[in-house]
Structure formats: C-alpha cells, structure tokens
C-alpha cells in the first residue's frame, strides 16, 4: 500500500513539475487563444491520454526499456523535438487565423487538437524520464505489486496535470476576451509559438546523453 503522506508528497511534486513552463503549457495557451476553450480542452484530453499511456507503459516496464535503449531513446528525443518545432511553426504561420469567440469546434478540428495533444506527449522524452526517474522514488518496495503502485501514482499525475492544463486553457480563453484587438492576440500567439520552439530546442539539449 502507498501511504497517504507519500501520495501527498508525490502530488506536490507533480504540481511543481506541471506549473514549470513546458511544451504543453505553451501549446495549449497558443491554441486556446486562437481557437477558444473547446479546442483547448480537446487538446487537454489528448494530453491526458498520452500521459496515461506513458503511465501504463511504465507499469509494463516499457519506459525502462526505452530508457535503457540508446536507439529508442534518441528516436523519441529527436522525434519529440521535431514535432514540437512543427507545432511552433504551425502556430506562428497561422497566427492570423483566429476563430470567433463563440465559434463551435468542428468534429474534425477537435479530433486534430486531440491528436496533437496525444502525439506531443507520446513523443515527449521528459514524460519517459519522469516515469523512470521521478515516479519510482515514491514506490514502496515490498508494499504491494509495483505495477499497481505505478498505475496509482500515474493516475494521480494525470489528474493533476489535466486540472492544471484545463486551467491554462480557461485562463487563455478568458484572456482573449479581455484583449480587444485581434492584432494583440496574434502578437501573443506568435510569442507563445516562439517559446514553444525554444522549449523544443531546450528539450533536445537537456535530454541529451
């Protein structure tokens, strides 16, 4: 069994990790500024599924396999960086494409946002590092099946991350209501796109071995 204090400490660690600026934060904010909260929440759902998939992979031992394989790890690292750079370019080049405030999210657009959020986290080496280096520190050896403990802690992480990501989406959506001029929205979105590109380069550099 995992003690309550261990769960609380782990939850606090997850909060600190998630409020640190990263690719999810920049991407969700840029998307919500341009497309509104519906599209933003669709992307949040994709991010949640991606993080949950990584948690299941960790429980099955796949995260450790990736961590121990130089080829798989490098493929994941450069694939993630390239995908983030593509998202940054897409956000920059489409900065003028801003949907009306109350425009409904089309099914195809919602699926696209979900897919991008999903792929962003499946290709995120930081997620693999979290499940290999951070999460195991909170496992209780001899206190139950490691796989079950991993799944429980992964669920806690996904819930916390989803709540924070949803808050970012709602904040960005409210911000676009405050900003009167479309030019200001475009400027902010391009700043976020540039930040996402910088984060992509930083991730590729910081996760090098």
Image: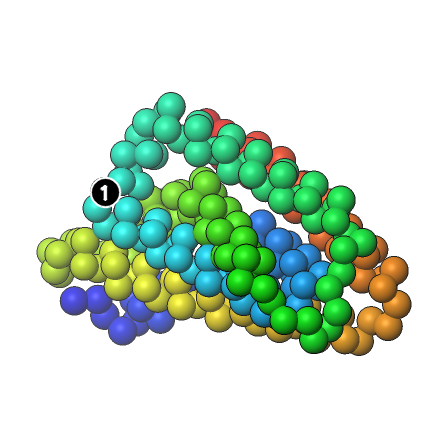
Q: Position of residue 106 (x, y in %)?
A: 58, 64
According to the picture, the residue beneath numbered tag 1 turns out to be 61
Q: Identify the residue at image location x=29%, y=57%.
A: 138
Q: Position of residue 8 (x, y in %)?
A: 35, 71
Query: Could you tell me how many numbered marks the image carries?
Result: 1
- Name the foreground residue: 91 vs 198: 91
Q: Is residue 130 left or right of residue 138?
A: right
- Residue lying at 46% horizontally and 63% vertically, measured from the top left: 45
Using a 10 Å C-alpha cutoff, classify the residue at mark 1 as few (fewer than 14 neighbours), some (14 to 19) or many (20 or more).
some
Q: Is residue 102 visible?
A: yes
Residue 5 at x, y percent in the picture: 30, 71
Residue at image location 23% in from the left, 70% down from the top: 3
- Relative to 182, residue 24 above or below: above
Is 113 left or right of 140, judged from the image as shown?
Answer: right
Residue at horizontal 63 percent and vertical 38 percent from the top: 85
In the depicted structure, whether residue 109 falls above or below residue 197: below
Up/down of 119 relative to 173, above or below: above
Quadrant where the N terminus sits is bottom left
How far across and down, in percent of the image, does residue 73 sit?
40, 31
Examine the image and state in which quarter residue 197 appears.
top right
Q: Residue furthest top?
A: 71
Asked which quadrant contains residue 175, the reply is bottom right
Q: Does residue 135 appear anywhere in the picture?
A: no
Task: Give the left or right position of residue 126, taking residue 31 as reference.
Answer: left
The quarter holding residue 180 reads bottom right
The colour scheme applied to this rendered structure is rainbow
Assign a secondary structure to mark 1: loop
């Amino acid at each position: 069994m995992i003690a309550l204090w261990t769960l609380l400490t782990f939850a606090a660690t997850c909060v600190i990790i998630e409020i640190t600026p990263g690719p999810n934060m920049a991407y969700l904010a840029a998307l919500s500024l341009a497309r509104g909260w519906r599209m933003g929440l669709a992307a949040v759902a994709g991010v949640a599924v991606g993080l949950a998939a990584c948690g299941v992979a960790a429980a099955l031992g796949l995260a450790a396999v990736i961590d121990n394989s130089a080829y798989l790890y490098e493929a994941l690292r450069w694939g993630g960086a390239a995908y983030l750079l593509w998202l940054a370019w897409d956000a920059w080049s489409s900065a003028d494409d801003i949907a009306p405030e109350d425009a409904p999210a089309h099914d195809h657009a919602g699926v696209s946002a979900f897919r991008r959020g999903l792929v962003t986290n499946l290709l995120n080496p930081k997620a693999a590092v979290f499940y290999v280096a951070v999460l195991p520190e909170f496992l209780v050896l001899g206190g139950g099946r490691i796989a079950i403990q991993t799944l429980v802690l992964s669920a806690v992480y996904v819930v916390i991350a989803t709540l924070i990501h949803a808050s970012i989406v709602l904040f960005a959506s409210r911000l676009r209501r405050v900003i009167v001029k479309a030019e200001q929205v475009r400027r902010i979105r391009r700043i976020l796109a540039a930040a996402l590109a910088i984060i992509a380069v930083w991730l590729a550099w910081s996760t090098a071995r």
